[in-house]
Image (cartoon, grey):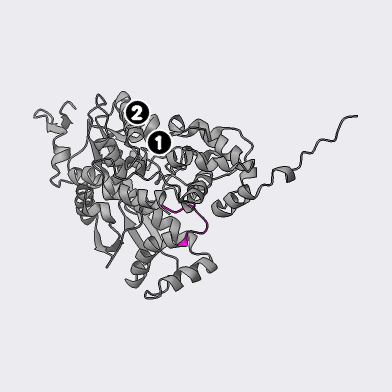
Amino acid sequence: MKKLAYFPGCAMKDQARPDENGALQALAILGYEVEEIPRWNCCGTVYSLAQDDLMRHVGPVRNLVRVQGMGEKRVLTLCAMCYGTLTRSARFVEEPERLERINAFMDTEDDFRGGIEVVHLLTLLRDEVGYEKLASKVKRSLDGLKVATYYGCVLLRPREFAVDDPERPEVMERVVEAMGGTPTVFPERMECCGAYLTVGRSDVVTDRAGRILRSARGNGADLVVTTCPLCQFNLDERRPAGAPSLPVLYLGQLLAWAMGVDEPAVAALVSKEPATGKPVPSGV
Amino acid sequence: MASELDLSRDRLDAPFARRVEELSGENPYACYQCGKCSAGCPFADYMDVLPNQVLRLVQLGDESALDLSAPWVCASCLACGVRCPKGVDIAKTMEALRLLALRKGISPAPATPDRPCPQIALVGAFRKLTP
């Protein structure tokens, strides 16, 4: 078993539980001993874009100090938002003057020394596990399911922190293929759902969700998969009346089901066809 | 006799533009108004003026940019920044405008959130819509 420090973030303990449950079971099957970092706190969800707003980087950086304290050099996130804040804040405070100020501010903590690598589940699957090994662990193929791969913003932008090509990504599509599914590439797969605007401008988010879901369905998808809890909420809960009803699931749920773990949300989408034993869509 | 044309940036060099530059770390005068940011912005439909027009107001030192809805409709998705041929990260300019407004006491934060509302969205909104 390979040890891996893990930062869950708030959503994984709340609305995105199914993602964490699924992903952690899948990672165990893939040979990882995942260890949650001690005394973690919220990453802040959104990265501060201002030059003088150092205080808003304390949240993510303090989590990286905890990783450092474990003697680890890297940390895993499942959540796209957490990936964004942790990677970007770490780089922003590496500049010596900022580092000195932020360490002075966190005077009860060990100094952050930098050099912690943040990995997202998708990059781990691509760069370390590999699509072939992933495919070899698949017990139930997603054969017959057309999966719309929704990236959203943070996984792909800005360019320096993108998990893949920001305009032509393929990592999520390859992961879906490794599980036996058919990825549905649709034009809105990289377009923002509205993120935190859902708090005060749910009208905008509802409109965005409708466009994204219609685009996915219009391109033949049976379901949408994402790694972002805010995207999942916005697409699912802000779905406008009359929009396609296709389910919006987390990557962790698909991985778990494909590897033979109980996952009712995926099981509901497929039914065994007695003649071939292959799963087929149950008519979404 | 024709008067001499002054094409230097000196006449445009407004304190407001410099303040926005200082906060955002992005040079507003790098923008040559191609409009690619607005063409790809998923939120342009909901803005009062387009992203490239926001940047033009900043270039002109026009503080009415602080009264626009556009910076508050921007969700920092960064689609503009990855496509800008001049490498301007416009989302940072939008953030600077939000912060300048917030620090003057202007905030569009709703008194109550639209429901249901997950904590991940609330934390994000607190960070973007409060000083």
Name the main secondary structure of what is drawn in magenta. Answer: loop
Q: Which mark is residue A225?
A: none
Name the residue located 23 percent from the left edge and 51 percent from the top edge.
A23
Callout 2: chain: A
Element assignment for label 1: loop
Q: Are marks 1 and 2 in contact (CB under 8 Å)?
A: yes
Residue wearing tag 1: A191
Could you tell me which quadrant the N terminus of chain A lies in? bottom left
Question: Which residues fall within the magenta stretch?
Answer: A47-54
Q: Amino acid at mark 2?
A: Arg
Q: Chain of mark 1?
A: A
Q: Position of residue A107 (x, y in %)?
A: 40, 75
Tell me where residue B23 appears, x and y as whole percent: 55, 54
Disc 2 crowd rating (10 Å Cα; few below 14, some 14-19, many 20+) is: some
Picture coordinates of residue A235 (x, y %)? 29, 36
**Cα separation between marks 1 and 2:** 10 Å
Give the residue at the far left of this rendering: A274
Question: Is residue A226 shown above or below A188?
Answer: below
B115 lies left or right of A69: left
What residue sits 22% from the left and 48% below the top? A15
| Residue type (three-letter) at the residue carrying disc 1 | Glu
Left/right placement of residue A28 relative to residue B123 reads: left
- Mark 2 sits on what residue? A211
* A265 or A106, nearer to the observer: A106
